[in-house]
Image: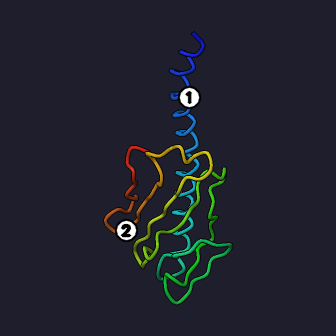
Amino acid sequence: IIGILTTVAYPSYRSSVNKTRRSDGVAATLGIQVAQEKFRANCPFYAQNLGASNICGASAAASTVQAAATSREGYYALTILASSATGNAYTVVATAQGSQTSDTTCTPLTITYNTSNPNGLKAPTACW
């Protein structure tokens, strides 16, 4: 009886844990959005890189926004999608790491901000 209960309950438990940990990635990507908006107020484009301080370079590729490359709880690695940062757009990618990699249907989490999607285009949609 215990074996049957374990077989039925464990996958549900694992799914619940993954969903809870996913909020770490969601919060981190939204934190980068706030940092990018503050950065953009003083620079003619969004930053392509994450780092310890804000640096407005000669282009988006040469600019850095102050933000961590790992989510607060460490379940996600954060990046800005290569060459996605411009004067009016960027894409943040949160890739699961460690035990969160078992959440295969929701890694990576991406959110794209541009003039067509000012509230962010979130993918995979069901994971947000």
Single out the mark in the foreground, 2 or 1. Answer: 1
User: Could you tell me the amino acid type at mark 1?
Assistant: Tyr
Q: Is residue 24 above or below residue 86?
A: above
- Between 114 and 4, the residue placed more toward the observer is 4
Secondary element type, mark 1: helix
Residue occupying the point 54% across, 66% down: 79
Secondary element type, mark 2: strand
- Percent x, y for residue 29? 53, 58
Residue occupying the point 44% across, 77% down: 83
Residue occupying the point 62% across, 56% down: 71
**In the visual, does 18 lie left or right of 110?**
right
- Cα separation, mark 2 vs mark 1, equals 37 Å
- Percent x, y for residue 58? 52, 90
Q: Is residue 23 above or below residue 84?
A: above
Q: For mark 2, does the 10 Å Cα neighbourhood hold few (<14), some (14 to 19), or many (20 or more) residues?
A: some
Q: For mark 1, does the 10 Å Cα neighbourhood hold few (<14), some (14 to 19), or many (20 or more) residues?
A: few
Residue occupying the point 41% across, 65% down: 113
| Residue reaching furthest to the bottom | 58
**In the visual, does 81 lie left or right of 54?**
left
- Between 47 and 21, the residue placed more toward the observer is 21
| Residue reaching furthest to the top | 1
Q: Which mark is residue 116?
A: none
- Percent x, y for residue 38? 55, 70
User: Could you tell me the amino acid type at mark 2?
Assistant: Asn
Quadrant of the frame with the N terminus: top right
Count up the numbered dots: 2
2 or 1: tag closer to the N-terminus: 1
Residue that mark 2 sits on = 114
- Percent x, y for residue 9? 54, 22
State which quadrant residue 127 falls in.
top left
Residue that mark 1 sits on = 13
